[in-house]
Amino acid sequence: MIVINGESITESTLPNLEDLEKTIFQRLLNDSQVYSYDSMEELRFEIALRNNIVASAALMAQGEARFETFAGSQGNPAYWNITEAGGFLIRDDVNSSDAITDIFENSQFYAYECATAILILYYHAILNTIGPKLFNEFFQDLLLYSWHFDSDLVMQSVYTYYTIPGDVVYFKNPDFNPLTYWWRGENAVVMGDDLYFGHGLGIKDEAYIIEFLNGTRKPDATKPAYLSDYVARPSFSHLAKLFSQQNRRTKHQHPVIIHRKNSISLDRYLFYLYRSYLPNQ
């Protein structure tokens, strides 16, 4: 259900949408959860950003970037320095928009794990939604590592099996083989038409991803891999309001949580992050 300024809307409210945009709108409209917006522009922003997340995932799937553990992270040194933990720290002499774009245009130089891939997709989709000028103003000193996110990119975790294109789901592999620990799970973008994009796997259906993960379990495994009810998504309404502001403000960045566990969910990363703010942690 969609509510704008306290008024519910119908499918006829936005008649001239492209195919995927229409699917996104209908999924929002038909959800039992209420999606509340202050303006029609906020709703249009969410639809556009979700559409661009899917487009960025499709572009990454077509590229040559490899799946790797943190230890094997690789990037184009013209834009990124690789940290000791395997993160990507932007050089101070380049624009954020150019550095993110290079990951897609020169994908053969890059290797990263699946949580990092999601943040790359988010930044690329936001860049394509708001343009380079605003993007460079809001997202400076980028560090790509697991689920570490810029404080302007407010992340939300929800539990539901009702997904919308642009959402990120988590395929969990509870009995993963310790020798291939990076297949403990797979973060995957909901593409629509029952398809998902997972870095290292490509665009596949649910059955394929589960079968693949089952093939990476430890020899005495008893628990199969499964699609969890955990969904990650940015706060679209927060971003819409943020980018409409005329004045920038000083922001506090979250600490980088170095956990060295490949392919974790946002839910797990947020647990580590929130714990770091507790006293005596």
Image (cartoon, rainbow, N blue to C red):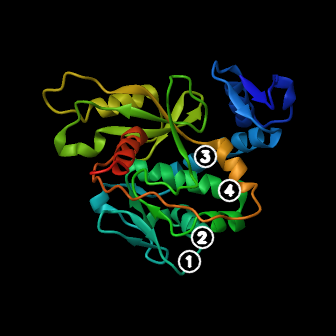
Q: Secondary structure at mark 2?
A: helix
Q: Residue at x 59, y 73 (%)?
A: 95
Q: Amino acid at mark 4?
A: Asn
Residues at discs 1 and 4 in contact (Cβ within 8 Å)? no
Q: Amino acid at mark 3?
A: Ile
**Cα distance, mark 1 to mark 4?**
18 Å
Residues at discs 2 and 1 in contact (Cβ within 8 Å)? yes
Question: Around disc 4, counting alpha carbons within 10 Å, would you say few (fewer than 14), some (14 to 19), or many (20 or more)?
Answer: some
Q: Secondary structure at mark 4?
A: helix
Q: Amino acid at mark 2?
A: Asp
The disc, 1 or 4, on the residue closer to the chain's N-terminal end is 1
Mark 2 highlights which residue? 98
Question: Around disc 3, counting alpha carbons within 10 Å, would you say few (fewer than 14), some (14 to 19), or many (20 or more)?
Answer: many
In the image, taking residue 214 as reference, residue 269 lies left or right, namely right
Compared with 83, 179 (above or below) is: above
Q: Residue at x 22, y 33 (%)?
A: 217
Q: Secondary structure at mark 3?
A: helix
Mark 1 highlights which residue? 94
Residue 232: x and y in percent read 50, 38
**Cα distance, mark 2 to mark 1?**
7 Å
Mark 4 highlights which residue? 128
Give the label on residue 53, or none: 3
**Cα distance, mark 2 to mark 4?**
12 Å
**Cα distance, mark 1 to mark 3?**
24 Å
Residue 46: x and y in percent read 69, 41
